[in-house]
Amino acid sequence: EAGVVQSPRYKIIEKKQPVAFWCNPISGHNTLYWYRQNLGQGPELLIRYENEEAVDDSQLPKDRFSAERLKGVDSTLKIQPAELGDSAVYLCASSGNSDGNYGYTFGSGTRLTVV
Amino acid sequence: AQTVTQSQPEMSVQEAETVTLSCTYDTSESDYYLFWYKQPPSRQMILVIRQEAYKQQNATENRFSVNFQKAAKSFSLKISDSQLGDAAMYFCAYRDSDKLIFGTGTRLQVFP
């Protein structure tokens, strides 16, 4: 099993440019999460999907962030335009039905640097 | 709102020794789940151990065990026989309505 796959591993962009991150969850996992981890902090939830529906996006800065999960499988997180404060690691995680109580499976994240 | 606090930004331990990482949390719920995750430089969050709040028995996974004190809202991680590969960031997490709330982490260094 490949686990949760994220790309790219690293991304450096200039401020005001757009950027997108991609996540492929574990096959069969219906719940997908995007977390942001600032330097020296723990991850914080941005958005949670149940299949293709975003069921918790209360922490997603909707003026510049957007996300989608086509067909309830892969997901893309986009920032447009990026700001210096968006520099962070963006982690994707997934879980199956009722698996959340057993913890989630995380990907290796994308480290974004905005210059 | 639920919060998770890790008061030790850094800890160190000698190889083969035992170390305990501290975590406290705040919640008004009676049934919940707690986790310890390890984050090596590869950045992937790896589940170390989980605890169900309604179970009084402390969870154990090989060299890793927890001391769960529900009344005190404390959830510490004990690593026995520490190995060089245990060096990483360790995060305590509380599961709230299908999302994890993480502490700020403890960096563990292991010296040979």
Image (tube, rainbow, N blue to C red):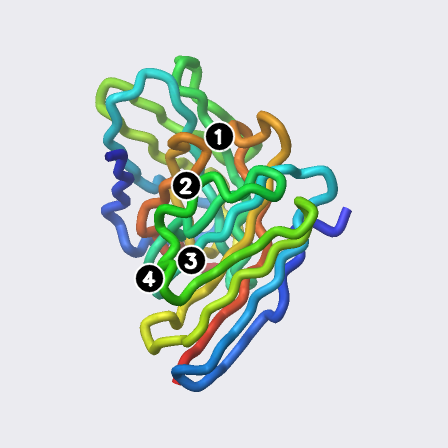
**Residue B78 location (% of width, % of height):** 41, 36
Mark 1 packing: few (<14 Cα in 10 Å), some, or many (20+)? many
Inter-mark Cα distance, 4 to 2: 25 Å
**Residue B38 location (% of width, % of height):** 48, 48
Inter-mark Cα distance, 1 to 2: 19 Å
Q: Are marks 1 and 3 in contact (CB under 8 Å)?
A: no
Q: On the same chain: label 4 and label 1?
A: no
Q: Chain of mark 2?
A: B
Q: Amino acid at mark 2?
A: Thr
Secondary structure of the residue carrying tag 3 is strand
Picture layout, residue B35 above or below residue A23: above
Which quadrant of the structure image shows residue A81?
A: bottom left
For disc 2, the marked residue is: B18
Left or right of residue B25, residue A57 in this image: right
For disc 1, the marked residue is: B50
Inter-mark Cα distance, 1 to 3: 22 Å
